[in-house]
Amino acid sequence: LLLAEGPTRDALASFDSYLATSPNGTLAEEALVGRASALMRLGHRDEEREAWTRLLREHPDSVQVERARRRLSELR
């Protein structure tokens, strides 16, 4: 919700907090996607690349795999 309606930096902080406390939690996949999206909005390309790469590594069966691959291609 913060990513959609609130300050992007606050959303990023929430995603980072969740991932720090629950790296394998139920919402880790969604938090990684949200983190990557927030980083994209902030123009942090290197960190965004790392987030998408982590998503592919840790959640290879994610419904977001194609999105991650497409965005990684754009970031090259």
Image: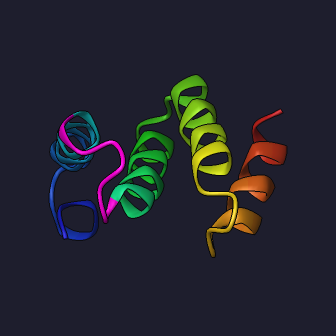
Percent across and percent down for residue 41 are 44, 47
Q: Is 26 one of the magenta-colored residues? A: yes
Residue 69 in the image: above or below residue 62: above
Farthest residue to the front: give it: 24
Q: Tell me the magenta residue range.
A: 21-27
Q: In the image shown, does 54 or 71 lie closer to the viewer?
A: 54
Q: How many marks?
A: 0
Question: On the rendered image, what quadrant is the C terminus found in?
Answer: top right
Q: Report the residue at 33% width, 42% height from top.
A: 23
Left or right: 39 with respect to 1?
A: right
Left or right: 42 with respect to 27?
A: right
Q: Report the residue at 78% width, 54% height from top.
A: 69
**Magenta: main secondary structure:** loop
Left or right: 70 with respect to 42?
A: right
Q: Report the residue at 26% width, 47% height from top.
A: 15
Question: On the rendered image, what quadrant is the N terminus found in?
Answer: bottom left
Q: Quadrant of residue 16?
A: top left
Farthest residue to the bottom: give it: 63
Q: Quadrant of residue 64?
A: bottom right
Percent across and percent down for residue 54 are 58, 39
Display colour scheme: rainbow
Residue 21 in the image: above or below residue 55: above
Q: Is 22 one of the magenta-colored residues? A: yes
Percent across and percent down for residue 58 are 58, 47
Percent across and percent down for residue 52 are 61, 45
Q: Report the residue at 24% width, 45% height from top.
A: 22
